[in-house]
Amino acid sequence: MTDRRLIAFVVIAAAGAGALGLALAKPQAEAAAPAPLAVRAITVAAADGVPPAGQRFAATLHYDREADLSFRVPGRLTRMGLQPGDRIAAGTVVAAIEPDAFAAAEAMHAAGAARDQRDAARIASLVGDGATSPAAAEAARDAARASAAGLAGARYDLASTRLRAPFAGLVLARRAEQGETVNAGQAVVRVADRSSPQIAIADVPAPVAAHLQQGQMAQVWCGDAMAPIVAHVWRIAGSADAHSGLVAVKVRLDAPIALASGTPAAVDFARSGLPQAQQRVPAEALIDAGTAGASLWLIDRGGHARRQQVRFFGFDDRDALVAGLPVGARVITAGAGFVGEGQLVAVIGA
């Protein structure tokens, strides 16, 4: 019995000593934990002229070949039967104006041309008999040619009282109504060539347009669509609008869609297709730099330092020119030379 009590006492004493040891060691362990390294950092902004990933620009859908049709002569509309959405063949009469005055002019010119032609033939026959001069015959021929030209013009005017579709397509809109008097050149109907590509036209800032390339992938978003339509940059305007400073960019849809011309849309451009724009960071942020690139320290969400490889272009005064930093990342500047991978840091200044 004595031995058992002695053993139990020894076990309890040992357990108590162990607990005491742990209690004494805990403050020492906490005291031994390294304090965060004080550093300074900057936050990376978007590079000038390069849209952040996912940024969309307002656009409208169109067919590449659309035209406002108009008469080349004025008159009162007597035929205007087509409606938006109608499909038409090339040469279809889409509208007509009152032809009476033009028909009368054509008849008058036709009579004059016939008369002058007869006079020219009669006078020419008299030259051989000496009854008239060659000069008079030449003048008669000139008059006949002038009359013929006038007749051709009158016939052209009469034919112009019918407005025909220049290509097979789709009626997009009516700009005038039957009975209305229209001027020469006034838009009467708008049509689209359905065989032409469907495009989205977006107005983007000039610095953004400068980074775009023909053939670069883009995405077109329409209405509440859950997925975008794949497209590619097709044409980039050579100049910016004088008032807005925006550049018109046309992107061509890879597949046709059943949406009306003029439908609002949005376009974003694939970042992978954009050239890497140069970003500026203080030169002291670089750990190393060479022809193969450079590296620096970023601070993750937990406040730990993570090494990041970037593309290096060189120095500009006190700045390093790099590319490949995510927008919003925090880059360690002062203190970068003392940081290790995964080390806890505390930012003490911007």
Image (tube, helix red, strand yellow):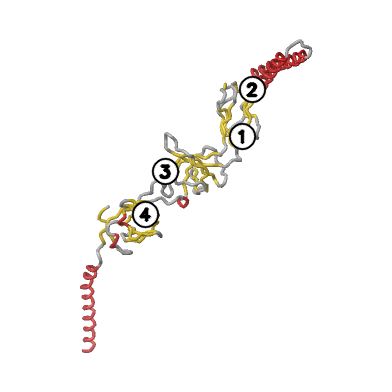
Question: Is 97 located above or below residue 58 in the figure?
Answer: above
Read off the residue under disc 4.
314
The disc, 1 or 3, on the residue closer to the chain's N-terminal end is: 1
Q: Name the amino acid, label 2.
A: Asp
Which element is circle 1 on? Answer: loop
Task: Give the mark toward the camera: 1 or 4.
Answer: 4
The answer to which of 154 and 31 lies nearer the viewer is: 154
Residue at mark 1 to residue at mark 4: CA–CA distance: 61 Å
Label pair 1/4, CB-CB below 8 angstroms: no
Residue position for label 1: 86
Is residue 1 in view from this perspective?
no
The residue located at (65%, 34%) in the rendering is 90
The image quadrant of residue 245 is top left
Residue 96 drawn at (x, y percent)? 63, 25
Give the residue pinned by disc 3: 207
Image coordinates for residue 54, horizontal then vertical, percent:
43, 49
At x 74% / y 11%, what residue is drawn? 132
Q: Nearer the viewer, mark 1 or mark 3?
A: 3
Sequence-wise, the earlier of marks 1 and 4 is: 1
Distance of label 1 from label 3 (alpha carbons): 41 Å
Tell me the crowding category of disc 2: few under 14, some 14 to 19, or many 20 or more residues within 10 angstroms, Cα based.
some
Marks 2 and 1, how far apart at CA: 27 Å
